[in-house]
Image (spheres, rainbow, N blue to C red):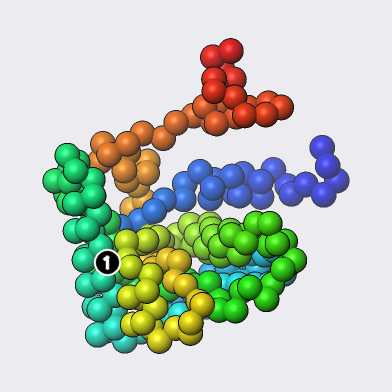
Amino acid sequence: MSKHAFSDSEKQAVYRAIAERRDMRHFNGEPVDEQVLARLLQAAHQAPSVGLMQPWRIMRITDVALRAEIRDLVEKERVHTADALGERSAEFMRLKVEGIDQCAEVFVMALQDQREHHVFGRRTLPEMDLASVSCAIQNLWLAARAEGIGVGWVSLFDPQQLSDLLNMPTGSKPVAVLCIGHVDEFYSKPMLELEGWTQAKPLDDFLWENGWQNTPMNEE
């Protein structure tokens, strides 16, 4: 055992937060304490980032009318997505894909502008700035689960339309609309599994050795 390891109870808490994190869609509207919210945002800001560029930009949406406009953008894209799904269109439209009206807080996570100036770690993989923002979102998500707060990541929107709505500078890009708030309960499984939309696959289906393989390790 590494001398740097956490205690058994601390390790169990970390793995529990990972295992029980859920993409929440149902909120009860109870306000989130400002100190708790500050801890969640600090957790996001402590995420790793390529070249320490910290490409995340975080916008708290407190204007009720603006929140409604964001929801309208999500609803518009929900219809377009349903059209693109063809025979699963009606099934998709029955899914609850966001909780913007019910959650206590709405945040928009975005990529900074002028990202082309950051070369460290991005010369051959420019998308690493997006990976960094995703790490910030995951940090917030896990911290929220530990605090008993639900988070829902909404990605159904046209990035340019949302950017225009929020007066974002040229070159920046919204990545996620985050719904944050108290919930009556956390889903026992990912909601899309509970709704019968899809099923998560086991780790072995994605784990290979010494290169890309077409057969999962457990079938060799």
Which quarter of the rendering shows the N terminus?
top right
Q: Residues within 10 Å of mark 1 (few under 14, many from 20)?
A: many
> What residue is at 47 percent from the left and 72 percent from the top?
173
Q: Position of residue 215 (x, y in %)?
A: 54, 20
Q: Position of residue 109 (x, y in %)?
A: 47, 71
> What residue is at 22 percent from the left and 72 percent from the top?
72
> What residue is at 61 percent from the left and 64 percent from the top?
129
- The answer to whether residue 73 shows anywhere in this view is yes
- The answer to whether residue 181 shows anywhere in this view is no
Which quarter of the rendering shows the C terminus?
top right
Residue 12 lies in what quarter of the image?
top right
**In the depicted view, which residue is nearer to us: 198 or 173?**
173
Q: Is residue 15 left or right of residue 26?
A: right
**From this viewpoint, which residue is outermost toward the left?**
90
Q: Is residue 103 left or right of residue 51?
A: left
When the figure is inspected, residue 169 is found, relative to residue 205, above or below; the finding is below
Name the amino acid type tagged 1.
Val
When the figure is inspected, residue 179 is found, relative to residue 198, above or below; the finding is below
**From this viewpoint, which residue is outermost toward the top?**
220
> What residue is at 51 percent from the left and 77 percent from the top?
171
